[in-house]
Image (tube, rainbow, N blue to C red):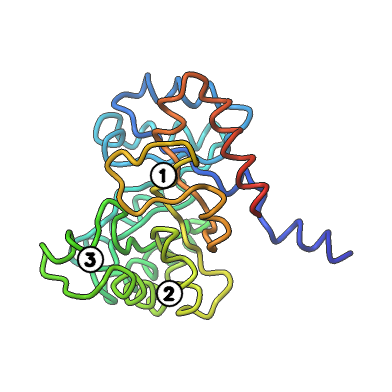
Amino acid sequence: MTATQIEAILKPSAKERLIVALDVDSQASAREVVSELDDVAEIFKVGLQLFTNAGPGFVEELVSAGKRVFLDLKFHDIPNTVAKAGIESARLGVWMFNVHTSGGTEMMTRTREAVAEFCVATERVRPLILGVTVLTSMDQKGLMEIGEGTDVAARVNRLAELAFSSGLDGVVASAKEAAEIHAAVADPNFLVVTPGVRPTDGTKDDQKRVTSPSAAISAGASHLVVGRPILDAADRRKAFLDILGEIELAA
């Protein structure tokens, strides 16, 4: 096998790096988006809004249709509760889910261990588990309001190191911190999944630490989560493919 063939196996395609955020208010709206992108998109994010409306049944529907699901519920509770929630996420067949790193090492470690044990016992593929660091809607002012005196980058790096030491597969963070995360965590397979991505000509909306798709990939993001720039586009398929093109150019 040539080096090029090996790289093709190990390196995900652009489509495998772009996650469409189904940040909509109903199953009908979500199904419409999935239908419009069915032949081009492989991964969809189900977050708090859609999950609260549609519940786990819609997640199972996506999984049954052959889609990979990033369950973005940002679990944050006592270790036992989060571990049990992680098991239920695995039972749904999701590809990835996340927890808040601020829940601490015990919470993250117990969740990873419990999910791994469940997946071995039930012969399932273990979902990837990510740790949420600092939300991309937060900036230095926001951190100071909640009593965090450190700057954003230092806070993100500390939480990324905690996630890594707890055995998680990666973190959710702004691409603005991706390079520093990779420098702090000496594992090339550690994922940095990046929300707050906007096309070069896009708006920031309520996000503060945003980057373009090409800049995010160049900075070291492994996956990009994109919602409104695709959902609000007149032609969603074209918007998806335009972002895909930016990823391909930067990869």
Q: Is residue 3 left or right of residue 8?
A: right
Q: Earlier in the sequence, mark 3 or mark 1?
A: 3
Q: Position of residue 44 (x, y in %)?
A: 47, 39
Q: Position of residue 5 (x, y in %)?
A: 83, 59
Looking at the image, which residue is at 31% across and 38% down?
Answer: 205
Q: Position of residue 85 (x, y in %)?
A: 29, 54
| Mark identifier at residue 80 | 3
**Which residue in the structure is indicated by mark 2?**
167
Tell me which corner region of the image, top left, top right, bottom left or bottom right, holds residue 222: bottom right
Query: In the image shown, does 92 or 165 lie closer to the viewer?
Result: 165
Q: CA distance from mark 1 to mark 2?
A: 22 Å
Looking at the image, which residue is at 31% across and 33% down?
Answer: 50
- What type is the residue that disc 3 sits on? Asn
1 or 2: mark nearer the eye? 2
Q: Position of residue 150 (x, y in %)?
A: 22, 75
- What type is the residue that disc 2 sits on? Gly
Crowding around mark 2 (Cα neighbors within 10 Å: few <14, some 14 to 19, many 20+) is: some
Q: CA distance from mark 3 to mark 2?
A: 17 Å
**Which residue in the structure is indicated by mark 1?**
92
Determine contact: label 3, label 2, CB under 8 Å: no
Q: In terms of secondary structure, where does tag 1 sit?
A: helix
Looking at the image, which residue is at 17% across and 59% down?
Answer: 142
